[in-house]
Image (tube, rainbow, N blue to C red):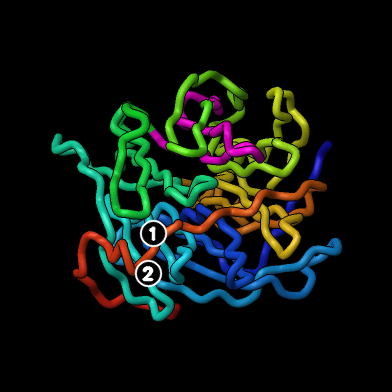
């Protein structure tokens, strides 16, 4: 099956990533990683082809790069930003929640992709700014603020998604050009039995991904201008063409989770490439003929887990 995604109205970003449908508020969240921006927008009238569009966005600006955000069960958002986990409340105020212990080896790192597992624990991975091989780690943040190392070393931690029954985790260390699958214990969150699932090379590297109710895995392929969907057995099911080469992530959105929102990047492209890809950095939309899985919020309880720090600072922008 071959599909084509259409551009959405919001202005292009530098490195848009981490789209997530916020079911509680009925809008889409996404980030612009190097700019430290957290955007949100509602679905509005049609963009064409019977598809809705994204309306005007509101933005919170953080003081550091932001890899991803997740809605919190208590309200507000949890951001994996810099090398810390931050709470962002409805007014845009930010507080430190927790932070992993990162190696003190002089290599600057930041969080990249992050997503909550079916029990509401946040998995978040790091990478070196200069993509030093093996400098990244995949962590798990529990609602009580405990941070556990799940996988190390990795290079560019990406592509998190769970099977409909929660017993499989799909994961990509992008430079391997491969999506792997783990057995996942829904009770403890433990991972085991890593093995290859799908290969995206040589056209591009796997980036963010989403899983549908049939267990198919929709993978953004950076460099290929595509999202590829793989059946549970790893066979190619569908290709979505995106008119921007650096496809960074995708998420199911809308009240029925039957829309696929795709993020892209302009970062690193030459002036000639930008002229050839005028929509680079924009969000795109299509109706893929599949329904996505609901994304669990971070399962926090502020009465019991107020966070590991009360240091706060003013955010720039509107919530």
- In terms of secondary structure, where does tag 2 sit? strand
Task: Name the mark on residue 210.
Answer: none
Q: Are marks 2 and 1 in contact (CB under 8 Å)?
A: yes
- The x, y position of residue 49, in whole percent, is 85, 61
- Name the residue rendered at 54%, 48% in the picture: 272
Residue pointed to by mark 2: 88
Does the magenta run of residues contain 178? yes
- Name the residue rendered at 66%, 55% in the picture: 261
Residue range corresponding to the magenta coloring: 156-181
Using the numbered discs, state the Cα–Cα distance from disc 2 to disc 1 in whole angstroms: 7 Å
| Crowd band around label 2 with a 10 angstrom C-alpha radius: few (<14), some (14–19), many (20+) | many
* Front-lying residue, 129 or 52: 52
Vertical relation: 15 (above or below) 136: below
* Front-lying residue, 240 or 28: 28
- In terms of secondary structure, where does tag 1 sit? strand
- Name the residue rendered at 65%, 42% in the picture: 211
Residue 202 shows up from this direction? no
- The x, y position of residue 234, in whole percent, is 68, 24
Query: In the picture, which quadrant includes the C terminus?
Result: bottom left
- Name the residue rendered at 54%, 33% in the picture: 169
Vertical relation: 28 (above or below) 241: below
Location of residue 155 by image quarter: top left
Point out the tag, 2 or 1, that comes first from the N-terminus: 1
| Crowd band around label 1 with a 10 angstrom C-alpha radius: few (<14), some (14–19), many (20+) | many
Residue pointed to by mark 1: 79
């Amino acid at each position: 099956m071959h599909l084509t995604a259409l551009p959405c109205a919001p202005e292009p970003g530098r490195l848009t990533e981490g789209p997530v449908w916020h079911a509680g508020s009925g809008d889409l969240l996404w980030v612009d990683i190097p700019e430290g921006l957290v955007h949100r927008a509602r679905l509005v009238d049609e963009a064409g082809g019977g598809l809705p569009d994204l309306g005007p966005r509101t933005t919170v600006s953080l003081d550091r790069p932001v890899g991803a955000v997740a809605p919190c069960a208590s309200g507000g958002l949890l951001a994996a930003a810099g090398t810390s986990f931050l709470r962002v409340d409805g007014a845009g105020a930010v507080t430190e929640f927790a932070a992993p212990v990162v190696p003190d080896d002089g290599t600057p790192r930041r969080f990249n992709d992050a997503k909550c597992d079916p029990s509401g624990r946040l998995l978040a991975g790091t990478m070196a700014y200069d993509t030093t091989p093996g400098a990244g780690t995949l962590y798990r943040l529990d609602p009580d603020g405990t941070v556990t190392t799940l996988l190390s070393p990795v290079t560019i931690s990406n592509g998190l998604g769970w099977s409909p029954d929660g017993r499989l985790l799909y994961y990509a260390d992008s430079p391997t050009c491969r999506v792997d699958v783990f057995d996942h214990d829904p009770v403890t969150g433990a991972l085991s039995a890593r093995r290859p699932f799908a290969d995206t090379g040589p056209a591009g590297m796997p980036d963010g991904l989403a899983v549908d109710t049939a267990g198919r895995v929709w993978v953004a392929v950076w460099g290929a201008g595509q999202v590829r969907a793989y059946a549970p057995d790893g066979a190619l099911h569908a290709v979505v063409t995106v008119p921007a080469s650096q496809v960074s992530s995708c998420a199911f959105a809308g009240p029925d989770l039957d829309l696929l929102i795709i993020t892209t990047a302009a970062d690193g492209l030459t002036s000639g490439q930008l002229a050839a890809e005028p929509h680079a950095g924009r969000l795109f939309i299509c109706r893929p003929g599949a329904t996505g899985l609901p994304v669990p919020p971070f399962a926090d309880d502020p009465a019991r887990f107020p966070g590991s720090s009360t240091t706060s600072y003013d955010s720039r922008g509107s919530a």
